[in-house]
Image (cartoon, rainbow, N blue to C red):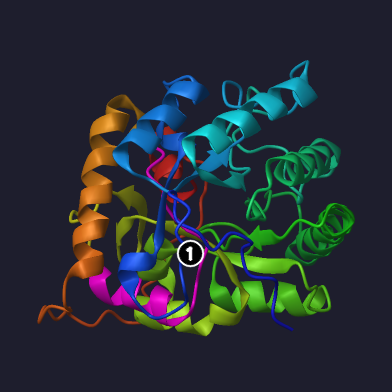
């Protein structure tokens, strides 16, 4: 079953974007997790001024906190701001310490008590519905050492089913992201989860282009083709094989013109949002360089560059939470 495609098929200026295989019609966005030091209003204004078509809005302490007072009023204000700036929106749920000030990403759907995570995701769905978001993205989490693989899987399936129920009621599309080091880290893992959930109509995939280079067995453009029928959200960044580190474009190993061409050929109409969560210290400059790079890549022909073939089993290692520097590089 094919999931509903992202609702908007327009650029930031309202121009209809046909699924014609032209990479220059892709709609470019930027993740607000890369603007962590900016007020949300200011981050949106900067991105609109730079020419982005939308934002991937990570719900966090300073960016539409779903647990702070006055949520309905604040959602309405953000909706007006997005509309005034002509920006589309995706909802992201990867805030590191929103739910637990001591433990990154905790609790996940895999923990003994996932109640707060499930409530967070239900609120994210509500916010997505109220903002007219193209999809709400979430992931599995890292399996706690005290939880067996089968127990973690059962918890994930049950938790996803609960979120899917909320999304069905709200008419919101979900994008589940395979994340290196997490219980679901690959396209193959996502397919297994999708099947375990009986292929829900609103349960699509969030594809991070960098992750494809990091650990998938196929060339990056083929990864796009593999999930084209279920693709509802795209994150884009550079990366190296076997290293889960989100890099600025041109500093990793990805050849982007073929990737953008694959997205266009797939008829993908959602946001292609830059995912650089470690670059908030220079957010406006990084965002400006990023959109210039992607525009140039979209209009260029495929170069003659050839990459050395990397064995398919040279995969990212799972997070062990050994050190802050090490684990943050593996599970963003």
Across and down, in percent, residue 30 comes to 42, 44
Side (left or right) of 219 relative to 6: left
Secondary structure beneath label 1: loop
In the image, is residue 270 part of the stretch drawn in magenta? yes
Above or below residue 97? Residue 90 is below
Q: Which of 53 and 285 lies nearest the eye of the viewer?
A: 53
Residue at x-position 38% and y-position 79%? 262
User: Residue 295's spot in the image, x, y percent?
Assistant: 24, 58
Q: Which residues are magenta?
A: 255-278
* x, y percent for residue 204: 66, 68
Q: Residue at x 51, y 84 (%)?
A: 226
Q: Find residue 97 and report its horizontal and vertical position in percent.
A: 61, 28
Q: How many C-alpha atoms fall within 10 Å of the one at disc 1: few (<14), some, or many (≥20)? A: few
- State whether residue 254 appears in this view: no
- In this view, 85 is above or below 168: above
Which residue is the site of mark 1?
16
């Amino acid at each position: 079953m094919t999931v509903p495609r992202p609702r908007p098929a327009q650029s930031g200026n309202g121009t209809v974007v046909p699924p014609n295989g032209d990479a220059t019609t892709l709609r470019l966005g930027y993740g607000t997790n890369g603007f962590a030091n900016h007020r949300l209003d200011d981050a949106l204004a900067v991105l609109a001024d730079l020419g982005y078509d939308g934002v991937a809005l990570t719900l966090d302490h300073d960016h539409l906190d779903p647990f702070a007072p006055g949520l309905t009023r604040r959602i309405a204000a953000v909706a007006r701001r997005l509309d005034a700036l002509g920006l589309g929106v995706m909802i992201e749920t990867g805030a590191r310490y929103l739910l637990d000030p001591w433990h990154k990403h905790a609790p996940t759907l895999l923990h003994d008590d996932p109640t707060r995570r499930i409530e967070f995701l239900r609120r994210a769905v509500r916010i997505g519905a109220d903002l007219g978001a193209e999809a709400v993205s979430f992931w599995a989490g890292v399996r706690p050492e005290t939880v067996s693989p089968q127990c973690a899987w059962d918890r994930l399936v049950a938790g996803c089913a609960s979120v899917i129920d909320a999304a069905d009621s709200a008419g919101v599309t979900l994008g589940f992201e395979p994340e290196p080091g997490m219980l679901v880290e690959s396209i193959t893992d996502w397919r297994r989860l999708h099947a375990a959930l009986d292929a829900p109509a609103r349960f699509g995939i969030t594809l991070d282009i960098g992750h494809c280079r990091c650990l998938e067995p196929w060339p990056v453009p083929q990864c796009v083709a593999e999930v084209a029928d279920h693709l509802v959200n795209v994150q884009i960044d550079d990366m190296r094989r076997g290293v889960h580190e989100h890099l600025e474009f041109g500093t990793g190993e990805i050849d982007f013109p073929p990737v953008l061409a694959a997205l266009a050929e797939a008829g993908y109409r959602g946001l292609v949002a830059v995912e650089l969560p470690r670059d908030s210290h220079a957010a406006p400059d990084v965002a400006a360089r990023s959109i210039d790079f992607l525009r140039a890549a979209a209009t260029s022909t495929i170069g003659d560059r050839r990459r050395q073939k990397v064995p398919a089993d040279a995969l990212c290692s799972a997070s062990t939470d050994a050190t802050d520097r090490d684990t943050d590089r593996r599970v963003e």
